[in-house]
Amino acid sequence: MAKSKQKQSTEFAELLDSKFKIPNTNIRFGIDPLMGLIPGAGDWLGGVISLYFLIQAGMRGGRASVLGRMFINILLDMLIGSIPVLGEAFDVYWKANIRNAEILQELEEDPERTTTESRLWIWFVVVQFVVVLLGTLLLISWLFAELLGLLF
């Protein structure tokens, strides 16, 4: 029974992320990037549909680190996918649903390894976020100091 559910998840991910191919290229895309073309709602709709994989992982006993990793995949897909033109290209490349279907399969095969990898991945993302945040704060502080220097 688990095999049929896994196959169903994989087929659904392929429909969302790689069902179609641009002729004479290796570029594949699914209905997720196409939904992203709907202004204002397409990427959010795609994100809601992508929650299917997160719910499946929860039902299969995925730990918080695994669910967090999957959620970050969906969140990146939604946020960056919302940027006109660049977002559609990112959607075609990122393939969050296929990534999450692969995590589901890994969860079935080796739950402990998947949990450990997910923890490391989440820490990597958190460190990246902190570095970007600190860099942004330093840049704003420097710009503010330069502006004050020009005024006084």
Image: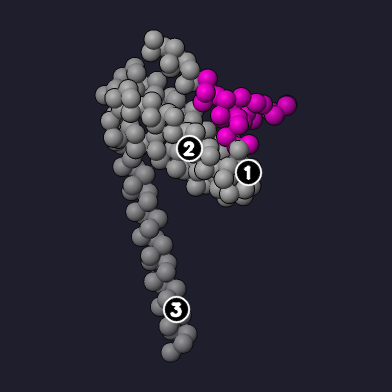
Q: Is residue 113 above or below residue 72?
A: above
User: Viewer-nearest of labels 3 and 2?
Assistant: 2
Label 1 neighbour load within 10 Å: few <14, some 14-19, many 20+: few
Q: Secondary structure at mark 2?
A: helix
Q: CA distance from mark 1 to mark 2?
A: 14 Å
Q: Earlier in the sequence, mark 1 or mark 2?
A: 1
Identify the residue position indicated by label 1 in the image. 38
Q: Secondary structure at mark 1?
A: loop
Q: How many marks?
A: 3
Q: Nearer the viewer, residue 119 or 42?
A: 42
Tag 2: amino acid: Val
Residue 116: image quadrant is: top left
Q: Using residue 27 as the reference point, say whether residue 132 is left or right of it.
A: left
Disc 3 and disc 2 in contact, CB within 8 angstroms? no
Identify the residue position indicated by label 2 in the image. 48
Label 3 neighbour load within 10 Å: few <14, some 14-19, many 20+: few
For residue 52: magenta?
no
Q: Secondary structure at mark 3?
A: helix
User: Viewer-nearest of labels 3 and 1?
Assistant: 1
Q: CA distance from mark 3 to mark 2?
A: 44 Å
Disc 3 and disc 1 in contact, CB within 8 angstroms? no
Identify the residue position indicated by label 3 in the image. 146
Q: Using residue 68 as the reference point, say whether residue 88 is left or right of it.
A: right
Q: Earlier in the sequence, mark 3 or mark 1?
A: 1
- Can you see residue 66? yes
Magenta stretch? Answer: 11-34
Q: Identify the image quadrant of the N terminus.
A: top left
- Residue at 34% over, 38% down: 68
Whole-percent x, y for residue 49 in the image: 49, 33
Q: Residue furthest right?
A: 24
Disc 1 and disc 2 in contact, CB within 8 angstroms? no
Tag 3: amino acid: Glu
